[in-house]
Image (cartoon, rainbow, N blue to C red):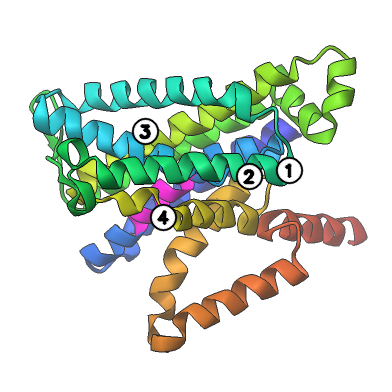
């Protein structure tokens, strides 16, 4: 039954991604869709850490920024092929995440949140001050993403790359959750002491999921850098990290499809609310606050529970 639901969800997502471009009248809509898809991939990885393992991270935008800057620096200054730069950035970010994960993941609750916040702030400060390498506040320009002689550009090209990457990320996440590793992650979330008693190496699994979620962010950051053409330290700011966490919470923690829905909603909603002009932030805050009051588990888990109750009563 669970396998059927997972397959149905992936198929529905693939159909939606295939049909959506038919509704886009111009390139502006592609830009919004690309942003939503990239955010969704980052949130799928972050949800593994927050939703399934119960480890908060307020510095994930830093890993996103490191992936972006790694690709920009390697391709711009050393003329490394973009795909190689992307993989090198992912390896660097994964190694960094592995090194810092073991000490900070010993912390819990708000102590862990403060530690990850500190990591994000350090990354932001380094990107902002080391002008000789990162360009400082002015940032860096990037070239188009090329693979051999093929150059990725145009409205549709990035959309299909983002859509394919999202399907791959969701598929990997669902398979990880249904594996013995996923069961260990849920055990860590439920009770670390209980998990250790039954033989689960909690440190190993927490480090593993931290590295996986950081690599997700790095890969998306690298692609984002080539798509946008100009990156600045702001992409690794604290507010960006909070935005990513909010997307996961809004869609529904411990729900892969919820993370996707939350990312899409918070990526698209600011553009929809531009009609409110100066009150855009107020309206957005009211919508989020109302959702959290009446749907504390998040949008997707709440709607799924109501649907199951309706079917049971019928």
Query: Residue shown at 44%/61% (left/top)?
Result: 267
Residue 113's disc number? 2
Q: Which residue is mark 3?
A: 219
- Secondary structure beneath dot 2 equals helix
Nearer-the-camera pick, 124 or 88: 124
State yes or no: discs 2 and 1 in contact (Cβ < 8 Å): yes
- Which quadrant holds the N terminus? top right
- What residue span does the magenta drawing correspond to? 33-42
Distance in Å between CA atoms under marks 2 and 1: 7 Å
Instruction: Name the secondary structure under disc 3.
Output: helix
For the residues bearing labels 3 and 1, Cβ distance under 8 angstroms: no
Q: CA distance from mark 2 to mark 3?
A: 23 Å
Q: At 79% across and 15% down in the image, what residue appears?
A: 200
Where is residue 80, by image quadrant? top left
* Residue at mark 3 to residue at mark 1: CA–CA distance: 28 Å
Residue 17 within the magenta-colored segment of the rendering: no
Q: From the viewer's perspective, is the residue at label 2 or at label 3 nearer?
A: 2
Q: SS at mark 1? A: helix
Residue mark closest to the camera, 3 vs 1 = 1
């Amino acid at each position: 039954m669970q396998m059927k639901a997972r397959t149905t969800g992936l198929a529905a997502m693939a159909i939606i991604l295939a049909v959506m471009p038919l509704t886009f009248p111009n390139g502006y809509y592609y830009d919004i869709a690309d942003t939503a898809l990239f955010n969704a991939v980052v949130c799928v990885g972050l949800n593994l850490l927050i939703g399934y393992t119960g480890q908060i991270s307020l510095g994930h935008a830093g890993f996103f920024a490191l992936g972006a800057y790694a690709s920009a620096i390697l391709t711009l200054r050393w003329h490394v092929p973009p795909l190689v730069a992307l993989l090198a950035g992912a390896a660097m970010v994964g190694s960094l995440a592995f090194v810092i994960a073991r000490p900070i993941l010993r912390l819990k609750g708000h102590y862990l949140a403060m530690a990850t916040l500190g990591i994000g702030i350090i990354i932001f400060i380094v990107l902002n001050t080391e002008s000789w390498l990162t360009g400082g506040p002015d940032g860096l320009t990037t070239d188009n993403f090329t693979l051999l002689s093929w150059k990725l550009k145009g409205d549709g090209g990035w959309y299909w790359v983002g859509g394919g990457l999202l399907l791959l990320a969701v598929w990997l996440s669902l398979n990880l959750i249904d594996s013995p590793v996923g069961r260990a992650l849920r055990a860590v979330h439920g009770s670390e002491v209980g998990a250790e008693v039954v033989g689960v190496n909690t440190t190993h699994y927490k480090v593993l999921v931290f590295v996986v979620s950081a690599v997700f962010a790095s890969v998306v950051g690298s692609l984002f850098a080539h798509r946008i053409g100009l990156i600045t330290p702001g992409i690794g700011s604290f507010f960006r990290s909070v935005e990513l966490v909010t997307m996961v919470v809004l869609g529904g923690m411990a729900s892969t499809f919820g993370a996707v829905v939350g990312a899409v909603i918070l990526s698209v909603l600011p553009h929809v609310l531009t009609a409110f002009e100066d009150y855009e932030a107020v309206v957005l805050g009211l919508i989020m606050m109302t959702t959290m009051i009446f749907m504390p588990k998040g949008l997707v888990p709440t709607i799924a529970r109501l649907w199951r109750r309706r079917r049971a009563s019928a």
